[in-house]
Image (cartoon, rainbow, N blue to C red):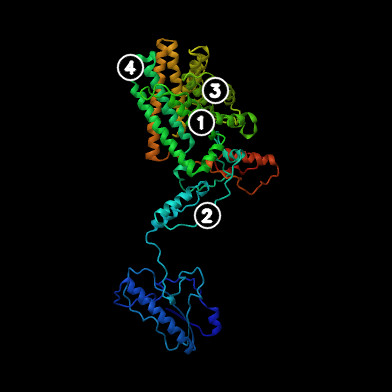
Amino acid sequence: MIRTTCSTKEDFVQKLPSMSRTITFHKMKRFDSILEDVDLTNYQLEATRSHSLNSLATESKAAAEQQSDTSISISMPPTPCFNEIHSQTSTPRGTTTQNNKRILSYSQASTPRGTVFPESPASGKFPSTPSRNPKINNNNNKLKDTRFDSFKTWSGRLERQISALRGKEQEPISQPSHHIETIPVDRYFDALEGPELDTLRASEEIILPEDRKWPFLLRFPISSFGICLGVSSQAIMWKNLATSASTKFLHVSLKANLGLWCISAALMVIISFVYALKFIFYFEAVRREYYHPIRVNFFFAPWIALLFLALGVPASVTQNLHTSLWYILMTPIFCLELKLYGQWMSGGQRRLSKVANPSNHLSIVGNFVGALLGASMGLTEGPIFFFAVGLVHYIVMFVTLYQRLPTNETLPKELHPVFFLFVAAPSVASMAWATIQGSFDHGSKIAYFIALFLYFSLAVRINFFRGFKFSLAWWAYTFPMTGAAIATIRYSLVVTNLVTKCLAIILCALSTLTVTGLLVTTMIHAFVLRDLFPNDISIAISKRPKTTRKWYLGSSDTKHIDQYLKYVDSSQNKDIEASLTHPNSSN
């Protein structure tokens, strides 16, 4: 108890101390003292203090009517820490001196909000002590993190139903947010940069938190199906090695084809299941990937992987596939092509010269793979139709990418493996046309030689294979390399000599080693290092650009301003203050 005596009533009004001031118990004697030989339990201690404070409030009101001297008594509750009790000699609480005339007690009504002790001591209530385990509170805050709700669909309702079954207290249902709308394609080009449109510009901001790792489903991209393409194409290659007459001397068993086919089927099921969960729980993220001008090409990947599984099915599983399977698998590819090719031709921001990228080859390869499977089933018209569609669009695509019309930028090192997609389309096209015609004729040889030249032109560039970090883009090596190896096996059946046989063995060995190394490396990064799936910035851009204040330099000449900005952008790692020299100033 702290007492302050004022000489006059006016001084009391002016010197009334602030209730929010903090006083340490080391600075005042007998502050927060406890009588000696106190040995009570927590429940007895709380009851005793509550009774003492109630008595103090009653005595204070009675003494206020009898005494005339002005004094102030601030009743401060003890510290909330009850575990350690120090024995001290102190004056019993509630005693008053004879000179005191008047006591002003401050109750809960006179205590402002936001003070340290909001509850009234006179009511017998003590401040609630904070939790001694802060990890529990942090875990609860993480579980209740609502910053990702804008990307959820009906998963919140499912979570509430699960919590209700567990008997947990339900929170009020919030109204669905209305700020998630379809992002126009212009925003992707304005907010993102780079050939793959996956890097956020410095002047932009994302709508998802940057201070933590996102949920796994939000970080799981559609490009993960590239793993299925690589492994399933290996099953086709080993099937051809075991059944081809030109490679009979290797004595390859069909068990390799069976094992790889089972692994690729398992991978396809797992990746499809995970992405289906993303579609269910985070539909907004899938929708943004679909409207992304580059990511939309990877929606062909799961259907192409299923076509590969049909082509590489072991003879022990089935001998003949029903033709209805071909129509089922080619229907989604045909629908995607109607949308994508129409946008390339109609113009606008999604025209081919604007969005052309090596990943666009995935939309072309689907035509040739479908033609190959249909022709192997005995179909004629359907395979020729898709072969013609793929051929005309591949020619346009090849010319556009060869000249780098979109941005005239070079791909970063992390995306150099994507260049091998140039090899995929002509390799599969040569086999598709050979199956349609019934022989590896001149048309098939032309397509095969184009693929072989592109393969060699990329393989001799050693700088493409070093100096960049592992990512899912590395799987772009596997599928085109395997396609070139299979086409070489088919070519060695027509041109039977030592060179073609050695070339087929070398390409098959390189493809197998690449797939094995990438599969092991992918598993290490996914399950050990856990850095395979970083935050997917490209799906978290805002619909509207970030508003920034315009600023100008001392010169009013806009040409000088542009020159200054270009200089600053080109020297990111240099001292920016060094670039403040006026453009007209001499060196």
Query: Dot 3: what SS?
Result: helix
Q: Amino acid at mark 1?
A: Phe
Query: Dot 2: what SS?
Result: loop
Image check: 577 left or right of 453? right
Q: Amino acid at mark 2?
A: Ser
Q: Which residue is mark 1?
A: 300
Q: Quadrant of the C terminus?
A: top right
- In the image, residue 122 above or below residue 412: below
Q: Quadrant of the N terminus?
A: bottom left
Q: Which residue is mark 2?
A: 174
Q: Is residue 280 something one can see in this rendering?
A: yes
Q: CA distance from mark 4 to mark 3?
A: 36 Å
- In the image, residue 229 above or below residue 453: below
Residue at (45% x, 18% y) in the render? 487
Ranked by sequence position, the earlier of labels 3 and 1 is 1
- Of residues 347 and 135, the one nearer the viewer is 347
> Callout 3 environment at 10 Å: few (<14), some (14 to 19), or many (20+)?
many
Q: Where does the image place residue 266, in percent across and percent down from the top left? A: 39, 33
